[in-house]
Image: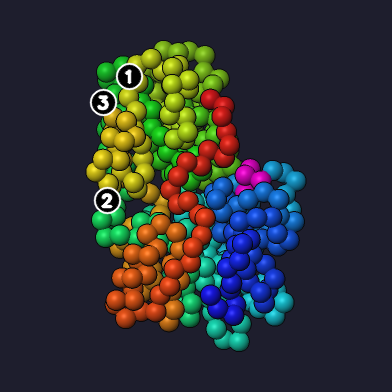
Amino acid sequence: MNDMLQLNPKGLYCSAGDFYIDPRQPVNKAVITHAHADHARWGCRSYLCATEGKGVLLARLGSDASIETLDYGDFKTVNGITLSLHPAGHILGSAQVRIEKDGRVWVVSGDYKREPDPTCTPMEPLRCHVFISESTFGLPIFRWPGPEEVMADINAWWRSNRDQGRTSILFAYALGKAQRIIAGLDTTTGPILTHGAVEKFNSCYREAGIPLPPTQYVGALGDKQILKRSLVIAPPSADNPSWLRRFPDRIRAFASGWMRIRGNRRRRSVDRGFVLSDHSDWDGLVETITATAAEKIAVTHGYATEMARWLNEGGRQAEVIPTVFRGEEDDAGGETES
């Protein structure tokens, strides 16, 4: 790709600093943009992440992982290059990786969003010479409604179901999306119950100082009558008959950017879809790429080919980097508990 960052079978490698960014395989030194499973893999000798993200990364990798942290905006010298981490606004502790050498700057975005989120630090666009951007939703069809509007719809849906004496089950990614939704729920409607994968990360968020309303692990629920008033937050992997049978009278919904596409709700076989994503929509991607003033853009995962083509047609220099990152998919972290 260039003389500073190269893609090899283990991932995106910084030769000057001798480290990988979100490696695909175990390596000696890994710089991690965030703790989702497709970016943070077990088995590396050492990890570097943003200070805010250490708790969720430990929950992902295990307590024996060797993790060094760096505050947002602080600098670290590695083999003659200057390395720093900056907010990406994706989930708690998510970071862009900024690399500088001899006056030139490279930025690897990781996953990011531009919308307000009370559970993580807002994304800060960085001026650079080379910008490596995600493009999970890199098509003009993907434009998000305001998050306040979406949360109002979720709360109204929950109240309506409660008034009918039915359990509301909302599927959302266990790390990040679930906590963002929980933070915006109207707790006067009823109890908030959670799948074990969600509750594990709730604890990490609270330990990091992120205020969340009270939640209860659904597997420890005693009084089943509570279900008639409850909202249950679970990862998409829990949408199966064996887990759902404990909720005999239920209504199911799914929160994801993919709900913008007509037909996705029907393919998911859920009763309701809410358009809520922890990735930038088309406008957010274009706004961010423009703000970097980068002379070269490398686009990765999602609709990367389409985004690179649009940038090149507009006079920008863009290329595609193939990766194995999944974007918005289930992230239960291997949890199968209830």
- Front residue of 88/213: it is 88
Residue hosting label 3: 160
Q: Position of residue 116 (x, y in %)?
A: 38, 54
Q: Which of the pair 237/149 is nearer the observer?
A: 237
Residue at image position (55%, 34%) is 197
Q: Secondary structure at mark 1?
A: loop
Between marks 2 and 1, how big is the CA–CA gap? 27 Å
Identity, as a three-letter code, of the amino acid under mark 3: Ser
- Check the image and report above or below for 63 versus 85: above
Q: As displayed, is residue 51 above or below residue 233?
A: below
Earlier sequence position, callout 2 versus callout 1? 2
Mark 1 = which residue?
166
- Front tag of 2 and 3: 2
SS at circle 2:
loop
User: Residue furthest toward the bottom?
Assistant: 102
Q: Which residue is mark 2?
A: 145
Amino acid found under the numbered disc labelled 1 = Arg
Residue beneath the point at 31% across and 70% down: 310
Tell me, yes or no, whether the highlighted magenta stretch contains residue 146: no
2 and 1 marks in contact (CB < 8 Å): no
